[in-house]
Amino acid sequence: MTISEYFDLLWNDYTLRTITLGTAVLGATCGMLGSFAVLRKQSLLGDAISHAALPGIALAFLITGAKDTNVLLLGALVSGLIGTFWIRGITSKTHLKSDTALGLILSLFFGFGMLLLTFIQKQPNANQAGLDKYLFGQAATLVEKDVQLMLIVTGISLFVLLLFWKEFKILLFDADYAKTLGFNTKFIDILITFFIVLAIVIGLQTVGVVLMSAMLLAPAAAARQWTNSLGVMIVLAAVFGAFSGVFGTAISATEDSLSTGPVIVLVAAVFVLFSFIFSPGRGLLFREIRFRNNRRDLQLKKTLQFMYGIAKDHEDISHPHAIRILNNFQGFTKKSLQRLEEKDWIQLFGQQWALTQTGFEEAKNLFSQKPNDD
Amino acid sequence: MERKLAVQVDDLTVAYNYKPVLWDIDLAVPEGVLMAIVGPNGAGKSTLIKAILGIIKPIAGSISIYGKPYDKQRKLVAYVPQKGSVDWDFPTTAVDVVMMGTYGSLGWIKRPGQKEKKAALEALEKVGMLSFKNRQISQLSGGQQQRVFLARALVQNASIYFMDEPFQGVDATTEIAIINILKELRKAGKTLVVVHHDLQTVPEYFDWVTFLNVKKIATGPVKEIFNDDNLTKTYGINYKVAINK
């Protein structure tokens, strides 16, 4: 199947449509909520939470003996939340730094989860097969009910986000100040964290424990490159996330052996890479171009300054001088002389140059400009 | 005549991990003073402000603002945190940051509207930053960022202002601009408590001073208590400062 065939099929094939819608909604939610994780510098929190969710899935299966997705995800939610509160507890009650706490909880919970998974696999229960799909995710198992759950979660998070927009914003920017204004920062903090955990949990089935954090971070990191407005950033992150979901699903559908979760994450990574290089404000490419332009500009001004030094001793500033005398000065090339002439700062007569009135004024004011307001 | 007390701190003790940062502080700030808190690094100057504002929970002691606990008097108080305490790469603009000063009076959920925006623009104009209103905050210089923080506090329209090193890392022009605003606020009857590092400028800028080094060393009018004796007690070395008479 080619990509275009996939998009044709999308309108007719029920399964494909369900999966695509699911990954798109998931990508959008993760992008939206991931923006908060990125701006709070809690990028790794998502990774720890998703790993912490694994034992919950296994325990939920062991207790109920059934593989109902909602029950398993509820288990994931509970154990993800426990992991999160332990991380908070460790950082606030001990001298350990948050990266240590994150690493500790991540490996502890994940190890325990893996232990339970291997234990379950040895059980003589025919039902046990397939729990390991939560490790790397399996979008193909998405059914309409799962997508409905995702839509509900997305709807609620969007509602809460819009309702507490102002509170979220001030907490992200300046939590101490928010506290002095009378906001219960702990409540806002727990609210944000809860929704991040929720987004992670609904993504486990599709993307899996191991790669889930990329779904949170990649769209948000890409979006940050394109805008300086929080609102626009969150919308962009949601759009990038949704597109990653759709394209990831499309690409993986074209090859039988490509599993969807990793492809979605790779597509999201392409968004990040593209944004890091090509965004106009913060991208590497334009920064390099600006840097080069500045350097070229400075070089021209350096040459002009040198010319000014020669010309100002003459009564007639436009008195021509030989180009040769610029030789001991390294800032001049044929091209730079041409550029100076284009700017109408000098005139060239064969082997000679002369400063124009404009060039003279420009050079005179080069370093005596009024400093900026900083 | 005895002046009304704007801030009163009794027996305040704060500790991080068993080591006391502030020890048994009693402090009374009369209404309408422009007060500097001075002391060496680690003396607990910022902590004192944060404890008064309820950001840090003290081990013991009580704080009152015009005779009532801080929780009840929030709207009378504005805060300018240290510039370095936030991430200036946050995706927002100068006017947006200033508008945050109105969030307290708006309360939960309600969004700022035209009225709040107007107040924010006026505050930006007061600190000479109106032309930068839509500038992304990371593209402001250190001094401009400090002015934005000051404008945010001005928008709160408070009676008492707490400022944590508002002169840190700003150039002479900005320093003069800021001190002029502070003096204007005092003239309008406001009370200002400012953590300050530059001892040379204390007599010129402030009329009230508190010496702090974990314990309170002294507090009172600059003219009476800003002397070598108190400086030596606070900084631990034989401190001689050229006080501009």
Image (cartoon, coloured by chain):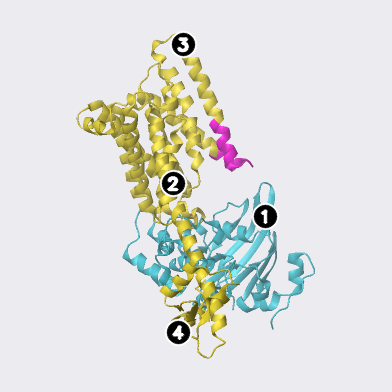
Chain colours: A yellow, B cyan
Residue A283 visible in the shown view: no
Mark 1 lies on residue: B21
Label number found at residue A357:
4
Q: Amino acid at mark 3?
A: Gln
The image quarter in which residue B12 lies: bottom right
Mark 3 lies on residue: A123
The magenta stretch spans residue B78: no
Left or right, A110 with respect to B224, comes to left
Mark 2 lies on residue: A221
Instruction: Give A293 or A344, whichever is nearer the viewer.
Output: A344
| First to last magenta residue range | A88-106
* Chain that bears disc 4: A
- Front disc: 3 or 4: 4
User: What is the residue that sits farthest to the right in this orientation?
Assistant: B238
Marks 2/1 same chain:
no
Tell me residue B237's x, y (percent). 79, 66
Q: Amino acid at mark 1?
A: Val
Instruction: Give A347 or B71, whichever is nearer the viewer.
Output: A347
Tell me residue B97's x, y (percent). 44, 61
Q: Residues under labels 1 and 4: Cα distance? A: 66 Å
User: What is the residue that sits farthest to the left in this orientation?
Assistant: A12
Q: Residues under labels 3 and 4: Cα distance? A: 92 Å
